[in-house]
Amino acid sequence: RLPPFDHAPEFTIWDVVARWKELFLAGFLAVMLIVFLSFRLWVVWQRELQARQFNQLILTSLGQGVYHVDTQGLCRFINPSALNLLRTTEAEVLGHSPHVLFHGHHADGHLYSHEDCPTWKTLQDAQVRKTEEWFIRADGEGFAAEMLVAPMMEGKTMVGAVVIFEDISERKQMETRLLQLATTDELTGLHNRRYFLDRLNEAIARVRRFGETTALLMLDCDHFKQVNDRHGHGVGDDVLRGLAGILRENLRQTDIVGRLGGEEFAVLLNDTSHESALLWAERVRARVAEHEYSTADGVFVVPVSLGCTLLRADDDENTVFLRADQALYRAKQNGRNRVEWN
């Protein structure tokens, strides 16, 4: 195969391989590398797809409502639980602002501006927020909701926010009921002694700080033991409930009334002068003295005696109760069914 040639040489595939073997080897290795990398990429893509499908399954299976908004505050995903809670459809939510559709209220039901929305705030500062809000269903019914807002990040770039919420109406009703049981006298429905003392101490603090004028009145049913002895405790309970009703009817929204125990009641008249407190006490005394109770033994009335005093800056609950109790004692000593001031 070296010159001089006496005839044309014969070339085979092996001649080509021998001539270009380095290039063929490099090409083969390159193809194998591409196949290997493609396979690895396909495996990673499959895992990512499975992870997304799994995450999607979790989101759709959650009992809590979940939705995602983009950086403009428009909904891009909402799970079935959220749709059920809101009684709406995916088509009515996707591409729209949840703030406008169903979330634009504080927990007390009042509207707030778009800038005050927890979701919008998170979109601005990327902070996690947890709060209680008021959601509106598609049929107009509202419900208390606990709401968690968290930013969605891709690297260091925020791409939106995810909101998780749940209906806490039953829990709020239970909390309200428990609070009511803890602060309400079961027989009369008035505030109990513990609640009244808390409000009394708050009133004393306002007197010290702002110089407000507040009156404390103590009431006690006259000869109440005779009512129980003659007519029974059931009638006695009716008398206490009747007195509680009269007190409610004559109170302003800012005033506080409570049952201290037995047949003893107390009233806080906020922002009330000495003269106004006396007029109120006389009006209630006269109203109670006219209220008749009917039994099989006939009709009777149960008057009350009242002791009144004004709160002072140097008072505590013991000193102010002592003055009111002393006034009440004088009312009893001076013939009952009367008002005394101390």
Image (cartoon, rainbow, N blue to C red):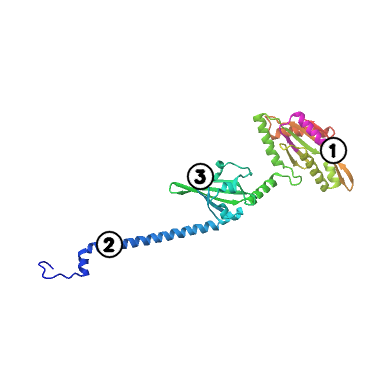
Position of 283 relative to 91 (above/below): above
Task: Give the mark, 1 or 2, whose residue is nearer the N terminus.
Answer: 2
In the picture, residue 246 is in which quadrant? Answer: top right
* Label 3 element class: helix
Badge nearest the viewer, 2 or 3: 2
- Mark 2 is on which residue type? Gly
Q: What stretch of residues is rendered in magenta?
A: 266-287
- Mark 3 is on which residue type? Leu
Task: Give the mark, 3 or 1, whose residue is nearer the N terminus.
Answer: 3
Q: Which mark is residue 123?
A: 3
Foreground: 221 or 142? 142
> Where residue 139 sits in the image (x, y, percent)?
64, 52
The residue identified by callout 1 is 289
Q: Residue at x 66, y 32 (%)?
A: 206
Crowding at dot 3, Cα within 10 Å, few <14 / some 14-19 / many 20+, comes out as: many
The residue identified by callout 2 is 27
Foreground: 112 or 146? 112
* Label 1 element class: helix
Q: Is residue 1 left or right of residue 203?
A: left
Task: Give the mark, 2 or 3, whose residue is nearer the N terminus.
Answer: 2
Quarter of the N terminus within the rendering: bottom left
